[in-house]
Image (cartoon, rainbow, N blue to C red):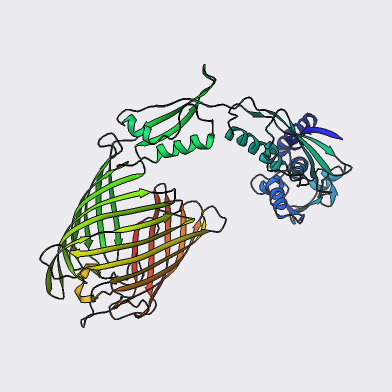
Amino acid sequence: MKTMPIFQVERIGWRRHLGMCLALMMMVAAAHAADPQPYTVAIAKTGDAELDQMLKESCTLISLNEAAPVGPFALVARARADVERFTIALQSLGYYQGKVQIRIANRPLDDRGLYDTIEYSPAQPPIPVQINFDLGALYHVRTLILDGEVPAEARQWLELKAKAPARAADIQQAREKLLLALQEHGYALAKVDEPIAKLLPETHELDVTYHVVTGKPITLGQVSVKGLQKVDPGFVGRHLQIAKGEPFKPSSIEKNRQELQNTGVFSSVRTRLGKNLDAQQQLPVTFMVSERLRHTTQLGAAYSTDLGASFSSYWQHHNLLGGGEQLTLTAGVTQIGGNSTTGIGYNVAVNFMKPDFLHADQTLHTNLAAIRQSLVTYDQDALLGEVLLTRKFSPFWTGSIGLGPEQSRITQQNETHDYTLLSIPASLKYDSTNSLLDPTKGSIITPSITPVGALTGSEIRGFVVIQLSASTYFDWHTEGRSVLALRGLLGSIEGAGRFDLPPDKRFYAGGSNTVRGYRYQSIGPQFADGDPQGGKAIATATVEYRQRILENYGIVAFTDAGQVSPDTLLASGDWRIGAGIGARYYTGFGPLRLDFALPVNQQSNSGSFEIYIGLGQAF
């Protein structure tokens, strides 16, 4: 029976270490003394895919073959060093009796004639190197021993069971999980030493011992925030949910750190625990904050063949009154060119956001905007207002309700009408995605209902807009490199006839947000001249596959489909399908997007192709 730290089996003893150093010195010297000898490597499969990958990654005979050619002595030294590396890999996965055999030119490494064989071998064909393994028995954990005074449930916190394969990584990970669990249960000063393993060769088992010192459960001492300058301490205090005297719990501390970071007023938030207990034997906690720049200015640009070029800029104050209030001024020029536009448009907006409005998880948004749109579908000049209250119910769920007055003048088919409307938008949003501009997993589901009525002097009847939008993202275990993205939209308008609706309130499809490959708003019922009429119901769907290439590049392939119907029957319109490919360049602030799309079943007002350029994924 042999006793050792569990990772000692992965370390090379001092004699072996000395031997490897001498071998490496010989390899360096020999590299200058002999011509390099080309060689090929054949590494046998073990039947364990994970082990095969680890062995391949450990093999310098493979990784240095072309990068660092060597002569006979250095080649043998490299092979001997790989024997040690392979042994470590075998033992780390539980094969403690595993053996490695490397043969060069069909001779073992201890063959005295090996050097001469290599020295006098021709450069072509390369000399063969064959690597074989005898795994032996897979060791399993027999018993787990916790040495020290620990809570009764501590054994469960290891998350390692008897009879499990004796993998070094699992045994070490169990130590880390035990330590985290102890800290999570208030043992802030707990220590768990490196595990000690007893090898039992007769039964191919390990006994693993963890020496644990828990100390006493600790409560929090003074909770303070350092680094505040312009931010109101009261605002910060409303976002801290921990206080002196509460049990020490790392997850709760981290949750509060993230809450401060998410306020948007800090560039960084770090946690610093006290080095020692205070006089009350409590552990102080300090949040070290750095306030972000109070003002930021950004410029943006986008282009598509249907809507042309657009340029925008905005100025934002991130902490207007000290409580995280945001004031945003936006101005943009739109519709510069484009096959779906008839003139240049603009948008100007002022937005004010007040967090913690009447409640810590409630935000008040107010917005005033002036827009001009000159589209093939209609021309519009409008003044829009909005007061919106949003409430975060959980990490994933958010609800909102508001009021949206608007005054607009719209011309369609040479007929001009003025509209003075009031809408009451209400929505519920589920969002579990991991990124705003480049989501790779999670889902977004947003049902909404918006009653709209006339305020004064309008013949418009009241109506209700009902929509359900959703998108979801599947990462194929590639850390975001291979992603399947799906998108869908259903919508219906109730309470008024199609031509009783203002043109801008009707549904349209076509363009980057619905069906790429078709001109903006072009899908659906048409007037006699081919211009879009809009409809009362919409249904669209998208399938998109995203594949990253190298570090900063990516390609996508997508298919969009959609229809707009003149009435409320979702299936009464003609379905149009667009398909295309795209390129992505990934930057630190999001991917730059270029999409090229074709209409599969063209209609009379669709072009031959469309191009879209912008920041962020299409959805």
* Rendering quarter of residue 357: top left
The residue sitting at the bottom extreme is: 528
| Spot occupied by residue 230 in the image (x, y as percentages of width and height) | 29, 30
| Spot occupied by residue 122 in the image (x, y as percentages of width and height) | 77, 52
Tally the marks.
0
Decide if residue 577 is on the left or right side of residue 248. left
The quarter in which the N terminus is drawn is top right
Residue 618 appearing in the image: no
The quarter in which the C terminus is drawn is bottom left
Q: Is residue 572 placed above or below 521 in the rendered structure?
A: below
The residue sitting at the top extreme is: 279
The residue sitting at the right extreme is: 202
Decide if residue 466 is on the left or right side of residue 472. left
| Spot occupied by residue 106 in the image (x, y as percentages of width and height) | 84, 52
Decide if residue 229 is on the left or right side of residue 459. right
Residue 333 appearing in the image: yes
Q: Which of 61 and 360 is in front in this view?
A: 360
| Spot occupied by residue 315 in the image (x, y as percentages of width and height) | 24, 44
Q: Which of 374 and 180 is in front in this view?
A: 180
The residue sitting at the left extreme is: 457
Decide if residue 20 is on the left or right side of residue 453. right
Q: Which of 73 and 395 is in front in this view?
A: 395
Q: Is residue 525 placed above or below 207 in the rendered structure?
A: below
Instruction: Report the residue at 80% width, 30% height from top.
Output: 15
